[in-house]
Amino acid sequence: MPTRWPDLAVLELLSAIGEHGSLGAAARAVGMAQPNASRAIATLERNLGLSLVERHPRGSRLTADGVVVAELAARLVDGAGELLATSRALRERHEARLDLAASLTVAEYLLPAWIAGLRHAHPELDVRVRVENSTQVFDLLADRAIDLGFVESPSVPRGLHSRTVARDRLVVVVAPSHPWTRRTHVTAHELATTPLVSREPGSGTRSTLAEALGAGGVDGAGVPELSRPAMVVSSNAAVLISAASGAGPAVLSELAVRPWVARGELVEVPVEGLDLRRRLRAVWRGGEPLAAPAAALLGELQG
């Protein structure tokens, strides 16, 4: 009884013998040297315990058992061909699609131009973007729902690779009527203990601010835990509108606040001794190659 699966190449050869009427012609048809073809058929016969090919001076032909086995072999070879064709089509579909997720600031102010540049170089590419906070971007990568993510958070979970793709600065802003507008600066302690209009937990902006305050120190002591927010909202636009309406100070990306400050709807307030610069990073799963479209996008950003 056979103990090993027959090799597809020898099954293709056996099927070709039935089609072409000789071992030599069959070997040429499948691109196999005739001595190798003879050995392959002999090994198949030995493994199956059957005589499949009759050899005589004028050529080779299938035995009765060989005809039956060759018909079954042809089905397997056809099935393998279908498997390869389907796999190729699936791979090409994946290679023509790029699934991204980006935290809000990156998605609103940077990613559109990045994607436009990528599509200019690869017009056939289908790019799909999900806008989530940084924590959710990490979760989507872990779930293999996206190929590449962009985050604002100060740290990246173990097991992910990252690369800095842009630099940003957080800015404290208040409504023009706020008392802080009459100050040359505020302290880190004041910022930490003042109720802010804030993004939701998990946002890169919120975690960056918390880390910056924790690292800054106040009079040699640690900055107290951030005060309970005056309001929590899930978009930069809502934070800006709320701050401009007088709901409280806000801390957002310079990219987001710049036009509001230019129009006079918000006022930037410096914070003494606090470094609010941050890196914006691309993140992807470690231990495996990047999908070709994701690698192309990273290449565009690096260039």
Image: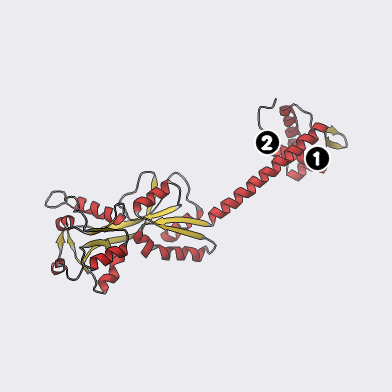
Looking at the rendered structure, the kind of residue marked 2 is Asp
- The one nearer the camera, 117 or 242, is 242
- The one nearer the camera, 29 or 80, is 80
The residue furthest left is 219
Disc sitting over residue 187 in the figure: none
Q: What residue is rendered at 60% in x and 48% in y?
A: 87
**Is 244 on the left or on the right of 160, as rendered?**
left
The residue furthest top is 1
Looking at the rendered structure, the kind of residue marked 1 is Gly
Q: What residue is rendered at 21% in x and 64% in y?
A: 247
Q: Which residue is mark 1?
A: 18
Q: State if disc 2 and disc 1 touch (CB < 8 Å).
A: no
Instruction: Please state the horizontal and vertical placement of residue 84, each as a whole percent of the image.
Output: 63, 46
Residue 152 visible: yes
Q: What element does badge 2 sit on? A: loop
**Is 300 on the left or on the right of 152, as rendered?**
right
Instruction: Please state the horizontal and vertical placement of residue 249, each as a whole percent of the image.
Output: 20, 63
Instruction: Please state the horizontal and vertical placement of residue 198, each as a whole percent of the image.
Output: 25, 58
Vertical relation: 243 (above or below) 133: below
Q: What element does badge 1 sit on? A: helix
Q: Which residue is mark 2?
A: 7
Q: CA distance from mark 1 to mark 2?
A: 17 Å
**Is 272 on the left or on the right of 286, as rendered?**
left
Colouring mode (rainbow / by chain / secondary structure / one colour): secondary structure
Instruction: Please state the horizontal and vertical placement of residue 79, each as a whole percent of the image.
Output: 68, 43
Where does the N terminus fall, quadrant-wise?
top right
Q: Earlier in the sequence, mark 1 or mark 2?
A: 2
Where does the C terminus fall, quadrant-wise?
bottom left
Vertical relation: 192 (above or below) 45: below
**Tag 1: Cα neighbours inside 10 Å, few (<14), some, or many (≥20)?**
many
- Quadrant of the rendered image containing residue 96: bottom right
Residue 285 visible: no
